[in-house]
Image (cartoon, grey):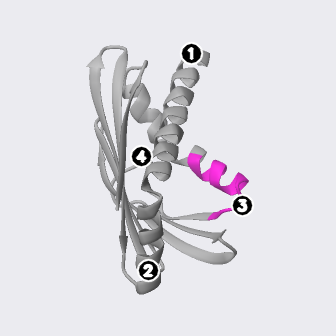
Amino acid sequence: MQFSTREDIESPIETVFENLSDFDGFERQAIRRGIEVQRDRDLKPPAQGMTWAAKFNLRGKPRDLSLLLAQYERPTAIRFEADSQGLDGTLTLDLMALSKQRTRLSVVLELKPKTLSARLLVQSFRLAKATLSKRFKLKVAEFAKSLESRRRTS
């Protein structure tokens, strides 16, 4: 199952890439939302091969997630690979400079079930694909707006 969208951001590609690479900030946001996050493999500066372990509750059940930074190509691409109980996921962030001050962000989220219960979960996502796609696009658009406002305030 795949979700994808594109957003144009009024900010230079380098600035957008730096904001997408603010892994410390994303970790703090996750912790504020009650997710336990631990960076297992920390590379300075950020590079391909970084890993995280996360623990959180979803639908009343504890979940474990391992996350790998599989691709990190400055300033055009970041790809994460996630592995959870029964479900694999890939999040791809591609950037393209439209001009000096405008960048296009393309986001693709792909989910692949590995177990029967995960297949049932993904099947329920397929039934609600239109609603979930709309919510996905809305969240990416909100994130893009937050990147623009960060640039204006800094």
Q: Earlier in the sequence, mark 1 or mark 2?
A: 2
Q: Position of residue 113 (x, y in %)?
A: 38, 75
Image location of residue 27, percent across then percent down: 60, 52
Q: Which mark is residue 109?
A: none
Q: Quadrant of residue 36?
A: bottom right
Q: Position of residue 98 (x, y in %)?
A: 27, 20
Residue 108 in view of the camera = no
CA gap, disc 1 and disc 4:
25 Å
- Mark 3 packing: few (<14 Cα in 10 Å), some, or many (20+)? few
Are the two marked residues, 1 and 2, in contact with CB atoms closer than 8 angstroms?
A: no
Q: Which residue is mark 4?
A: 45
| Rendered residue at 56%/15% (across/down) | 152
Tell me the residue at 53%/20% (across/down): 151
> Element under label 1?
helix
Q: Earlier in the sequence, mark 1 or mark 4?
A: 4
Whether residues under marks 1 and 4 lie with C-beta atoms below 8 angstroms apart, the answer is: no
Look at the numbered disc 4 and give the secondary structure of its residue: loop
Q: Does the magenta run of residues contain 140?
A: no
Query: Quick one: quadrant of the N terminus?
Result: bottom left
Q: Secondary structure at mark 2?
A: loop
Which amino acid, by three-letter code, is at mark 4?
A: Pro
Q: Amino acid at mark 1?
A: Arg
Residue situated in front as seen by the camera: 68 or 61: 61
Q: Nearer the viewer, mark 1 or mark 4?
A: 1
Where are the magenta residues, as a range? 26-36
Q: Which mark is residue 86?
A: 2
Q: Is residue 148 above or below residue 25?
A: above
Which residue position holds label 3? Answer: 34
Q: Which residue position is annotated with label 1?
A: 152
Numbered disc in front, either 2 or 4: 2
Q: Which tag, 3 or 4, sits closer to the chain's start?
A: 3
